[in-house]
Image (cartoon, rainbow, N blue to C red):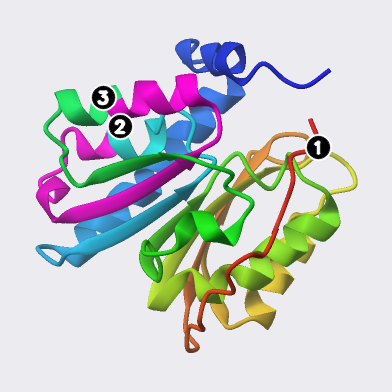
Amino acid sequence: MSTDWVAWHDRYEDPRSSVAVRLGVVQGFIRDFLDSRSSLDSRVVSLCAGKGLDLLGVLLSHPAKGHVTARLVELDAELASVARDVARESGLTNIDVAVADAGVTDSYVGAVPADLVLACGVLGNISDNDVEATVRAMPSFCVRGGTVIWTRQRNEPDLTPAIRRWFSAVGFAERAFTSPGVGSFAVGVHTLEGPGRALTVGQQLFTFTR
């Protein structure tokens, strides 16, 4: 039976839950990214954005919110509707919430290359082969100097060492990697040092396995 992702998001209501703690770490890295750009415009893309808690939760109070243009891609229409309502009610007029398959590259046409790519809650719900394919496609999502923030749980066998190697292999430098330890979550931050490349349209990067 497939996961009820709307109900799953209720876990964020408990500040002690691992997903809520992970969210705080991700939001901290998003703040760091926006702080580093001062008054520069930033284009953001979020894969499997859910309610947009990570990005929207920061933009609501960040002074750079008027400089951010974003596309949040979420297949579940109910979750996407929540994100859209939050953005509208908060006056975030440059936030596009697309009800679309985040695993298909067509969903990002016109939104990439981006300055910041959020791949949070994605890499732990797809096959290892799809994780590698997604990481190796990231140079087509980023401008040169663009940042990817990603998450993955560290259940055995722990795939995070391989993920970090795959980012390095396609021209990214690791800026941060934080985790409470094996069996918990990990958050990584990588910056594209090499050139970006054109997005390949019509490509299925990943499919959720649960």
Residue 175 lies, with reference to residue 28, above or below; the image says below
| Magenta stretch bounds | 58-84
Question: From the viewer's perspective, is the residue at label 1 or at label 2 nearer?
Answer: 1
Give the residue drawn at x 49%, y 18%: 12
In space, the residues marked 3 and 2 are separated at their CA atoms by: 9 Å
- Location of mark 1 (residue): 209
> Is residue 99 shown above or below 192?
above
Q: Position of residue 187 (x, y in %)?
A: 57, 48
Mark 1 or mark 3, earlier in chain:
3
* Position of residue 42 in the picture relative to residue 53 (left or right): left
The CA distance from mark 1 to mark 3 is 29 Å
In the rendered structure, which amino acid carries the disc numbered 1? Thr
Report which quarter residue 88 is drawn in: top left
**Residue 69 colored in magenta in the image:** yes
**Left or right of 43 on screen, residue 178:** right
Q: Amino acid at mark 2?
A: Gly
Compared with residue 81, is residue 184 higher up or lower down, i.e. above or below?
Answer: below
**Is 114 one of the magenta-colored residues?**
no
Q: Quadrant of residue 91?
A: top left
Coordinates of residue 98 in the picture (x, y in percent): 41, 41
Residue 103: x, y in percent?
A: 64, 51
Task: Provide residue 23's location: percent of width, then percent of height.
Answer: 47, 33
Label 2: which secondary element = helix
As shown in the figure, which amino acid type bears the numbered disc 3? Val
* Residue occupied by mark 3: 86
Query: What residue is shown at x 26% (from left), y 43% (from top)?
Result: 95
